[in-house]
Amino acid sequence: MPAARRRRDRLAIRHASIMTLTALWAAGACSSASAADSSGAAIGEHIQHIRGALLPAVVINGKREPATTLADRMASLHVPGVSVAVIHNGRLEWARGFGVSRIGGPAVTPNTLFQAASISKPVTAMGVLHWVQMGKLDLDGDVNQTLKRWKMPGSTLAQQKPVTARELLSHTAGLTVHGFEGYASGAPLPNLEQILDGLPPANSPAIRVDTVPGTIWRYSGGGYVVLQQLMEDLTGEHFAKLMQETVLDPIGMTHSTFTQPLPEGRLAELAAPYGMDGKPIKGGPHVYPEMAPAGLWTTPSDLARFAIEIQRSLRGNSNRVLSVSTTRMMLTGGLNNWGLGVNLGGQKNHPFFEHGGANAGYRCELTVYNAGDGAIIMTNADGGGQLTEELRRTIAHEYAWPDFQPKLHRLIHVDAGQYDLLTGTYQLQPDAFLTISREGDRLFSQATGRRPTEVFPESERDYFATAIDARIMFDRGARGRASRLVLNQDGQDRTANRIDDAAAKPIAEALAAINRRVHDQTPAIGSEAALRQFIIEISTGTPNYDKLGTELAGVTRDQLASIQTLVDRLGAVQSIALKEVTPDGYDVYTVRFANGSAECGLALHADGIIAGAFISKVEE
């Protein structure tokens, strides 16, 4: 029996019944990948298993599930192309492309370029740490002592504690701006100072300290723009050239570049980006002058070389960029278990580092164990986020990773009448609830802002979902009625107490109303008029804050200038058409302006207060 087959069967026994997972593999093992290709029979078999049957998040013991092939899943998620690189035992074992780089175009190959999006940050972090290691940059010093062309604006918060490079790398500097939209092809591009200060033609707010540095973890792409400026001021070199010389070339990332936009001579190498609906991103790839947080063009194979360099540097086998001690520092967890540029996880004896990425039309994921295995998955569509998760789960099972594998549950029979002892509304947070309801012989849970999810009994007190990886454990009192529950999701336990029926009634009624609106796709009364008025108020710089929820009012005040600039560019509203009503009660409209279009959504309360609003998918 081949080694890969023996490994597969052992996994099937450990994580599910042989009948379940081996049936899944067998049903899908009909791909065109040859078991006798140049990579060897075992590798070919691995690829067959992965592309032949993507595994679900949850497996029920003894239950056969229909196999979902990679090709079918790509089609359903509108993902034209995927590129995968797998690291096994500390080396690049295989890299393959699936699908096409553009609809009607050439096939994806291991050398096809994708935007790494936020996976740019770990690569940037390696470059920054190299200069720290060289003694040219103080990791814990005030970055304003190194910045020259631009300085971190003074504030009472920043004066309490200056911002450091360590905090910028670990998202603890208290800086604003989560991420960046990029710029459509041909649009005016801002320089670094304009991005940092949120000045036209920048399409993002000013990057500012609004929390005492070092006190909380909050993801900030803005902090990496500061690092980009810091690196240029430190060395006097353009960031893309600096990273090429410091990181990309020494590691052998020969296909990669931070240059934005991608040079014209290399456009034939890229995978064209597509939206969630499968339509091409207008004008092609967005341009990201925010190179440090989002601008890397690369391949999974090159990112595998980056990851393997970290693995080898940690062992002292290769220190082309970082020393052993600096690599250890990079992979040491701080607030929210983040290292310097990477998210950390895993068990004590099997730690891993990872980072995801999402640019317009690109979704990707890097997950690598400090020693041993890993995978890099890159797609050229907004629908690729779900696909990367499913591929990672399937690769994790195929290679027996200790994490990310499907969860195995056993299903028992419980009399449906027992469900009545569990139904009710449970409070997770002051404004977040989990409602448990019964429909005939089925039990459902619904969290605030989410669709109903059926849950199944594993015991009389333990229930699980199959649509998502979540478990609910009920605490039942002497008379059998549940008084509280524990929701386990994303590795975290959240306890919720059951509230009394009188307090639950208005919550249940509001939830039922949203469910009806979602089912019927009916907007809230007055939401279109409220959206029109809100856009007018933004364009004139006079929002009626009394009509906005507390959180929305605060965000609007902070970002009014940049939002007003965007609305002014789009011009007067020409038409508004309902697109959808989302499970969290947002009415989403397609708005056509004089100079473009966008998706605008708002959540309108019955009292006319706008609880939330957003603008996305802007096309000019």
Image (cartoon, grey):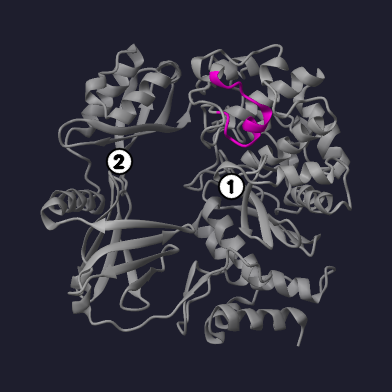
Residue at image position (31%, 49%) is 583
Q: Which residue is mark 1?
A: 337
Is 49 in front, or is 434? 434
Viewport quadrant of the N terminus: bottom right
List x then y, in percent, for residue 379.
Answer: 62, 50
Q: Is residue 312 magenta?
A: no
Corner quadrant of residue 592? top left
What residue would you read off at disc 2?
586
Q: What amino acid does circle 2 point to? A: Tyr
Residue 216 in the image, given as x and y percentages of width and height: 51, 35
In this view of the protein, can residue 123 be seen by the observer?
Answer: yes
* Quadrant position of residue 596: top left
199 sits to left or right of 231: left
The answer to whether residue 289 of the structure is visible from this angle is: no
* Dot 1 crowding, Cα within 10 Å, few <14, some 14–19, many 20+: some
Q: Report which quarter residue 113 is drawn in.
A: top right
Residue beneath the point at 75% across and 21% down = 232
Q: Is residue 166 magenta?
A: yes
Question: In this orientation, which residue lies closer to the viewer: 106 or 516?
Answer: 516
SS class, disc 2: loop
**Left of 438 or right of it: where is 117?**
right
Give the percent coordinates (x, y) of residue 516. Answer: 20, 52
- The residue located at (67%, 45%) in the rendering is 271
| Number of the front mark, 2 or 1 | 1
Mark 2 or 1 closer to N-term? 1
Whole-number angstrom distance, CA of label 2 to CA of label 1: 33 Å
State the extent of the magenta-drawn residues as a range. 160-173
Q: Secondary structure at mark 1?
A: helix
Q: How many neighbours does mark 2 have within 10 angstroms: few (below 14), some (14-19), or many (20 or more)?
A: many
Q: Nearer the viewer, residue 289 or 380?
A: 289
Q: What is the three-letter code of the residue carrying label 1? A: Asn
In the figure, 485 relative to 128: above or below?
below
